[in-house]
Image (cartoon, grey):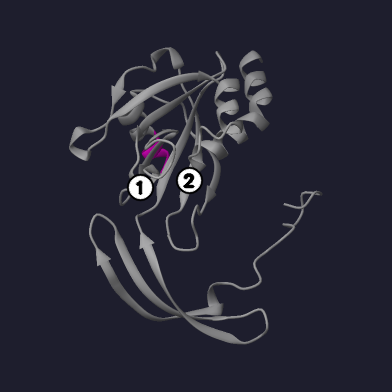
Amino acid sequence: MSSNGSQPAWVPSFGQHDYRLVKDETAFQGYFRVKRLTLEHKTFSGQSIEITRELFQRGDAVCVLLYDPTKDRVVLVEQFRVGSIKGPSPWMLEVVAGVVEEGETSEQVAKRESIEEAGLSIGEPRRIIRYLPSGGGCDEWIDLLYAEVDSDQAKGIHGLPEEGEDIRVHVLSSDDAIELVNQGVINSSPAIIGLQWLALNKLSLLGAVDA
């Protein structure tokens, strides 16, 4: 929204009707799928161009920031991530997350994954933001949610062995978690966005507890 709360300060120059799918091919099918798409779309100069791009398809996901406003603590999870093998460590500190199965709502995924990955029942989740983390080549949309938990119940190792999951729960003060973002130690985008949102909204969340 604009600063006066009326119309957005920016909207896209074009919409769904300004491109055309020319060809749709499957380039690879394994644990994930890669499509090879040929598309024609309008350009800012008033012309049109045809491009061919590979599109990584992994399904949409839900991530949930677990926060205990009574004790001002966050619950994060640590697990091995193959995409991080070039980083400082393949083990990443993240928010709880899971892929949306057919027919599931984001709230249902958040509740299911909080139990599977952290062993925690959550309060009614609320949306922080829905975003596209890598629009240049992947069609995964992420619903990032917020939910309140009792952090005293957060401990242990969780995950589904049949899915190759080995997940350790960590409880940190919100200040320590936010500082890990500032230091670049937390480098998962949903965790970064969620904790930055928490930094902006923590006073109101704590105030709701005190009210």
For this orientation, the residue located farthest to the bottom is 47
Whole-angstrom CA distance, mark 1 to mark 2, is: 10 Å
The residue lying at 35 percent from left, 60 percent from top is: 57
Chain part drawn in magenta? 106-110
Would you say residue 11 sits in the magenta stretch? no
From the viewer's side, name the closer residue of 69 and 104. 69
Image position, residue 181 (x, y; %): 57, 32
Write down the residue under mark 2: 143
Q: Magenta stretch: dominant SS?
A: helix
Answer left or right for 115 relative to 206.
left
Would you say residue 109 sits in the magenta stretch? yes
Write down the residue under mark 1: 100
For this orientation, the residue located farthest to the right is 4
Q: Amino acid at mark 1?
A: Val
For this orientation, the residue located farthest to the left is 162
Q: Amino acid at mark 2?
A: Asp
The residue lying at 55 percent from left, 13 percent from top is: 71
Task: Check disc 1: other Cα within 10 Å, few if <14, some if 14-19, many if 20+.
Answer: some
The residue lying at 68 percent from left, 23 percent from top is: 203
Contact, CB < 8 Å: mark 1 with mark 2?
Answer: yes
From the viewer's side, name the closer residue of 62 and 90. 90
Image position, residue 209 (x, y; %): 61, 17
Image position, residue 207 (x, y; %): 67, 19
Image position, residue 19 (x, y; %): 52, 78
Task: Report which quarter residue 97 is drawn in.
Answer: top left
The residue lying at 38 percent from left, 29 percent from top is: 78
